[in-house]
Image: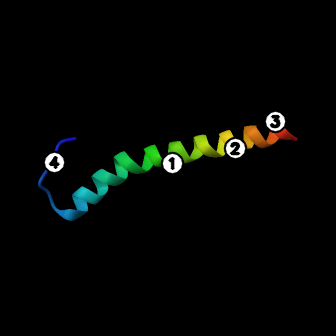
Amino acid sequence: MRIIVSPPNQIASAINSTVLPQSLKIHQNLVNLTRAISERDH
């Protein structure tokens, strides 16, 4: 990961565009996984 010296709002938007989609994808995977496990148990 390269460090870019830029205004804070550019840093924030860069973090939002890279980190948030990944964490949302991970969260969705966890939701799907727990749903599949609970359906299997019932």
Q: Earlier in the sequence, mark 2 or mark 3?
A: 2
Classify residue 20 as left or right of residue 42: left
**Which amino acid, by three-letter code, is at mark 3?**
Arg
User: Which is nearer the eye, 25 or 30?
Assistant: 30
Question: Which marked residue is nearer to the observer: mark 3 or mark 1?
Answer: 3
Give the Cα distance between marks 2 and 3: 10 Å
Which residue in the protein does label 3 denote? 40
Q: CB of mark 2 within 8 Å of CB of mark 1?
A: no
Q: Is residue 24 above or below residue 10?
A: above
Q: Earlier in the sequence, mark 3 or mark 1?
A: 1
Which residue in the protein does label 4 denote? 3
**Which amino acid, by three-letter code, is at mark 1?**
Leu
Q: Quadrant of residue 10?
A: bottom left
Give the Cα distance between marks 2 and 1: 15 Å
Give the Cα distance between marks 4 and 1: 23 Å
The percent position of residue 19, horizontal first and vertical second, equals: 38, 48
Question: Which marked residue is nearer to the observer: mark 2 or mark 4?
Answer: 2
The percent position of residue 12, horizontal first and vertical second, equals: 29, 59
Q: Earlier in the sequence, mark 4 or mark 3?
A: 4
Give the Cα distance between marks 2 and 4: 36 Å
Question: Which marked residue is nearer to the observer: mark 2 or mark 1?
Answer: 2
Classify residue 4 as left or right of residue 21: left
Give the Cα distance between marks 3 and 1: 24 Å
Instruction: Using a 10 Å C-alpha cutoff, classify the residue at mark 4 as few (fewer than 14 neighbours), some (14 to 19) or many (20 or more).
Output: few
Classify residue 15 as left or right of residue 7: right
User: Which is nearer the eye, 8 or 37?
Assistant: 37
Question: Which residue: 14% across, 49% down?
Answer: 4
Q: Which mark is residue 34?
A: 2
Q: Quadrant of the C terminus?
A: top right
User: Which is nearer the eye, 6 or 39?
Assistant: 39
Give the Cα distance between marks 4 and 3: 45 Å
Question: Which marked residue is nearer to the observer: mark 4 or mark 3?
Answer: 3
